[in-house]
Amino acid sequence: MTLRWPGTLRWPGRRWWRAALVSGLLATLTVGLAPQGQAHGPSPAAPQTTRAVPATTSQAPLRATVTVTNVIPQVLDVTSDQRLTVIVEVTNTTAQPLPGRVVLSLAPLNMRTRADVERWASGTLAVDVTELVAVDLAAPLAAGTSTQVTLAVPRTARQMLDGTLVNEWGPRGLVVTFEEAGTVRGQVRTFLLVQSNQQIPAAPVALLAALTGPPVAPVLPDVGEPGDTTVASATVDRVDQVLGAVRWSPQVAVAIDPALVTGPDQSLAAVLPDREVFVLPWGDPDLQALTASRTTHLLTRGRQLAQGPDRTNIVWSVDPLDAQTAAAVRGSGATWVVAPWSARSTRTLTYETTDNGDLVVLHPDADVSALFDGSADMEWARAFQQALALLATAARGGEDSKGPTAVLVATSRDWRADPDWTQGFVAALEAAPWVDLTSTTDLMATGQDLPRAATEAPLTHVVPLAGLDGARQDLSVFATVTDRPGVITAGVDEATLQVSSYAWRTDPQGQVTALRTVRSAIDKRRNGLRLTQPGTLNLLGSTGEIRFNVRNDLPVTATVRIRMDPEKGCLAGDKRAAPAEESDARVAPIWSQAVTVAPYSDTPVAVALFARANCDVTISAVLVAADGSTVTTSPVVFSARVRAQIESVGTTVVLALVALGLMLGVVRTVRRGQSARRGNRTTTEPVRVGVLGGETPIAGIPVVKMLTPIAGIPMAKLFTPVGGTPEVEPPDPADTT
């Protein structure tokens, strides 16, 4: 999306005010020609009287509404011959015709304090007023109809007015009443602003408008897929509305949410030329919600995303700052913040002392700001007069009486941004001699010896952002196993900040839905790497291995390891694959070597196992990064049967069989030496001890006796050569016997 200017405004420059002045003069000239039911003009014999206006309009029920549509001039110069004209509209709110007259009166009290201005505007200040002009209706006003009445102060009354004002600048009260037979049936109060030849101080006034969009539920695509760049029509309309309102008023600075400007090369200075431009954190995140959910690091991330070579960052809170939020703002690197007062005060600049340093706080004037953005629910003529009256008291001095008080006038984030209203308000400020329009940056420079602001406002707005932020951080860890982490985390920070925006305060249920949607999309990205589920493992022996399969559904290469966690210590892994810092615990994880998995592929992984004892054990396996941090969201669980003593039992059986075979061979050999085929020898030759089984037994000694151990001599020693025994001579080959 590219920010664009709307079409030509209806009343560019000062033409709007010229048209208003012309309409007032024409109404004055034609008042005598008003048709039946409209104003007939001033009564020829209308006396200039003084009477008291009570705090309330009247005890009688109101039957008409009176609306001020114009005050000409807005600031009356008593040193000139200007005439005061007030144009009003009277509406009959009853079901019967309503006769009567419209009276314009002046409260000569010079309102020097803000309290006087507010009491007069609210109707709680009772003061004597002087009637300036009265206009009778030519005919009763029909039920449900309206008529416009022009109240032009005649020259005779102007002379009396000069004497009443006593050539002193400042605001006075004007009251317009609709009377029926002497009874007040409708009333409205406004202000007469007076300029004299006195030296008039000027209050520095800065104007700041917010350019933020409606709540946006971001769509987070799958990894590697392009996102939807279509901007909602509501956002486009909002941007056009705000830009159109400030186009002809370069005195109005703009604080913009950079999420409304697409494209990395988009220049805000080019979009909003010839004015101050501030950049809010990305998505305009809710500071109080971030603080309550302990996710204030998102504010730091939002400010990083908003930074640029032609951008000046600003942090703007819609709630009064509490100590925790002030510390979070200062911790994000911000040095000043816009925030309302927790209690009514005329202070514009204060500071907060946090653990991270002092934070300068700019407090918009709530009353003047509401009149500027139109949220005061008041017609423009009366709103402008009241704003100038309040600024006149600021020019006289604030609470410390050290001279004019600086005033910051700021719009709400959802202001209706009417071009005529904005341009007219700026023109009214320019015409007031006690207003010095300045920039927000220069306004900050006026603060000296800043007082400390109250920071006792409790956190009132809590959003469940912790779970979403946790998923975001887990995805960042997950992305480290890939060769391009930015592909995995693309758009996640922006989406998280957008669903934490202040704009969602108008739709809390929609915000919860948006939070769940974004978290689901984040979890889906983490499922791009999967570990297959193996069957039951049977390990028969002291060593073995198990094979897994790693599936990569991501468009990037991933390097992972497998960590197995047995519930018992009967199974161990290759210590060479374990991290260097791993302890020799009895039940220690089993690690695989690192394996690299190509995009959209499967890779087998073998894990070496060593059995310590026989057991049946349950094992959970997960994919982990090189540092051991978990990659997969849910482990793979399987069972293993370990029989480590199978090998020792087999060896024992084999050895036993070998020993038995040897004994049987010995017995068989001995029995072969006693066969009938070999009979006893009867010779007189010396007896030779031949090889066992190879010679005829000694005459007279039974074979059984020959195998019987000699008393006192163990059987083992019978087969051991005796030291010193002479060698047995081999038989003579010549002997043929």
Image (cartoon, rainbow, N blue to C red):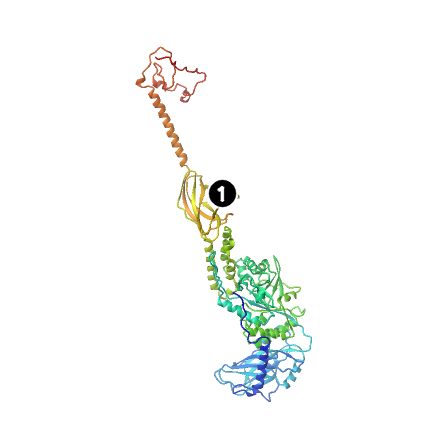
Where 154 falls versus 454 (above or below)? below
Q: Is residue 487 left or right of residue 79?
A: left
Where 251 falls versus 525 (above or below)? below
Q: Residue furthest left?
A: 676
- Position of residue 252 measured from the top left corner of the image (x, y, whole percent): 59, 69
Image quadrant containing the C terminus: top left
- Position of residue 407 measured from the top left corner of the image (x, y, whole percent): 62, 69
SS under mark 1: helix
Q: Nearer the viewer, residue 181 or 424?
A: 424
Q: Amino acid at mark 1?
A: Ala
- Position of residue 578 measured from the top left corner of the image (x, y, whole percent): 50, 43
Task: Write down the quadrant of residue 25 in the picture.
Answer: bottom right
Q: Residue furthest bottom?
A: 45
Task: Write down the quadrant of residue 708 in the picture.
Answer: top left
The residue shown at (37%, 30%) is 657
Circle 1 sits on which residue? 577
- Position of residue 334 measured from the top left corner of the image (x, y, whole percent): 60, 60
Q: Nearer the viewer, residue 404 or 536?
A: 536
Q: Nearer the viewer, residue 684 or 287?
A: 684
Q: Nearer the viewer, residue 450 or 625?
A: 625
Label 1 Cα crowd, 10 Å radius (few <14 / some 14-19 / many 20+): some
Q: Is residue 661 left or right of residue 183?
A: left
